[in-house]
Image: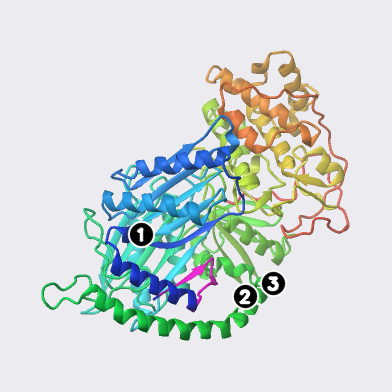
Amino acid sequence: MMLVTILGLPCFNLCMTTLLVFSLMITFLSQTGTEAAATYLYHECNTTTFTANSTYQSNLNRLLASLTSNATSSTGFYNTTASSLNSVDTVYGLFLCRGDVSTEVCQDCVSSATKDVVERCSKEKDAVAWYEYCMLRYANQYFFSSMVTDPGIYMWNTINITEPSRFDQLVRTTMNDMASGISKVGSASKKFGTKEANFTALQTLYTLGQCTPDLSGFDCSSCLQRAIASLPGCCGGKQGGRVLFPSCNVRFEVYPFYQSSNTSAPTPSTPPVIVPPPPGSVTTSKGKDQISTVTIIAIVIPISLLILLFVAGYCFLISRRARKKYDAIQEENGANDITTVESLQFDLATIEIATNKFSDDNKLGEGGFGAVYKGILPNGQEIAVKRLSRSSGQGKEEFKTEIILVAKLHHRNLVRLLGFCLQGEENILVYEFVSNKSLDYFLYDPASQKRLDWSSRYNIIGGIARGLLYLHEDSRLRIIHRDLKASNVLLDGDMNAKISDFGMAKIFGVDQTQGNTNRVVGTYGYMAPEYAMHGQFSVKSDVYSFGVLILEIISGKKVSSFCQSNGEDDLFSYAWKHWTNGTPLKVLDPNLENSYSRDQVVRCLHVGVLSVQDDPADRPTMASIVFMLNSQSASFPSPLRQPSYFLHSRTEEKPLSELESDQSTTSKSTPLSVNEASISELYPR
């Protein structure tokens, strides 16, 4: 029997499990093996709903029909979009079939899944559902090529293994070898693999792993490693277990549950989710000794009913106590939050070896909270280690908050948190290493500016926009960055933008649109007027900072030093003058010469001037901005007023954690100089 855990919280109910076992036994005895291809495992729907007979429902129906019709693909994977004139009602969806099953089984599973999921999530816009041989997912936000591990489903076999320590070690090494091979395959190939290993003379370990093929090799590897890291917590010492994420999944058993070739699906003996087949039970006997189905049912039904009555009584007695315990855990104030990322914890000794004991030769930079070092793990992976100084303004709570926040964010345009270390007096965050430093290194340095051609700049603008859209609307949390600037945008080897440094970020509630604080954090020149002057922040505060970034990227000039270098009043006035005069190309960095697209430059300048409007209501949302940047024919609103640029006279204070209240308390202020000043200047590469 398999047990299920969602996001690490127990959700096993003996009564419901017994009912499920009973129903699956009857289903197995009465239906064909093909129907077993759609054996349901679990699903999750979000809370955003659509109305019946709406445009969204029509698009969803068309998308599900398209998925079903394309389930004959030999890759076992397909993603598509269904949209109408109203882009708000666009639906994105995909299916992924297990890599060893035949196209017939894949098609049966997808066809059944598209009917089943709309019954389980009848009004919700986002859904993900897992079945034995396929996974189906759709949403009203773009999620393709993004690594996602939330929600996470954990299942395990209740039978214990002999020599659990040695077995768990074998599972870990075998899984890691398998994952390494999967992440190295090309983008056009199935990201699927299996691997076997001998545990004893009579027992063999069978492992399987798979990613959605649209992931990069790095994202696939990261997803599989997170899944493998979760196995000891859910399935340690067990004969079987699996972890199901939206972007990848892993499984191990002590019996062969997959085909050595992908010509056909495994023939099920019993439903593999609930009762793993014992050795030798994959085939059935034939001939005169075969027991009839009627006889089997006559035996199974009375026994199952007796077990059901017993378990129902037991469940009734323990349900209240279990509910109270669960509620108590949920209500604890932050004490257990960090357990959601325990699998990401690094040992201090490992980090010291990786950074050569925090050698100055490995230092990448230093900011208000501490230094950042480059490191190399034993497996050769490059990392960036953010080591908080003991006297830093970011204390234990801010540190813990950044872990919880960043660990839940997975997007190609955000710097990824790989782990952390809380040991002794050390507070350390481990990030992915981003090789090309930060945007300001290229943008403001005359020697490096020429490396940023217009194609790179346009791609960077789009990447920042998609990252902010994810923070504001597409992640499970609504997050205001509050310190978006060129030095907090890192560039990878392909010059793709990654937003970094979430030490000042603020988490919003689902229905919250604006917050107030008496402790303003951020950087001069990038802070929105309503935030700098009145402490009011919202998603439009980040839009303002993004608008400043666009103007800097187009012009190649720093907003706070533009007037000194150009003799103009300020960058905003300069951009507005050429926008209204119909000479937008004069804003362009002279280093770009003729290597630009006039249409793209005009669109970017349009977005930039709109985004730095003084009134937050006049600024577009990030969703509108992403649409504007990618549309070549649609008409957009014109900027209403010339934006004002001023040196903020308000004082700034030390940053709050993301868990601060909406109305924070007043504390002592420390005035800043006229030059650009920032609370945090870290470079977590």
Instruction: Name the residue: 75% across, 43% down.
Output: 523
In the image, residue 562 sits, relative to residue 349, either above or below, namely: above
Q: Which residues are magenta?
A: 2-14
**Residue beneath disc 1:** 209
Local crowd at mark 1 within 10 Å, few (<14), some, or many (≥20)? many
- Residue 335 shows which numbered tag? none
Instruction: Name the residue: 30% across, 57% down.
Output: 193
Mark 3–mark 1 CB contact (< 8 Å): no
Q: Of the residues tagged 3 and 1, which is closer to the observer?
A: 3
**Residue 181 shown left or right of residue 313 in the figure:** left
Q: Earlier in the sequence, mark 2 or mark 1?
A: 1
Label 1 sits on a secondary structure element that is strand
Q: Which of the 4 quarters of the picture holds residue 425?
A: bottom right
- Residue 326 shows which numbered tag? 2
Q: Nearer the viewer, residue 218 or 141?
A: 141
Q: Nearer the viewer, residue 324 or 412?
A: 324
Quote the CA–CA distance across marks 2 and 1: 32 Å
Quote the CA–CA distance across marks 2 and 3: 9 Å
**What is the tally of numbered marks visible in this picture?**
3
**Residue 133 shown left or right of residue 295 in the figure:** right
- Residue 274 in picture, x, y percent from top left: 38, 72
Q: Which of the 4 quarters of the picture holds residue 379?
A: bottom left
Label 2 sits on a secondary structure element that is helix
- Residue 331 shows which numbered tag? 3
Residue type at numbered disc 2 = Tyr
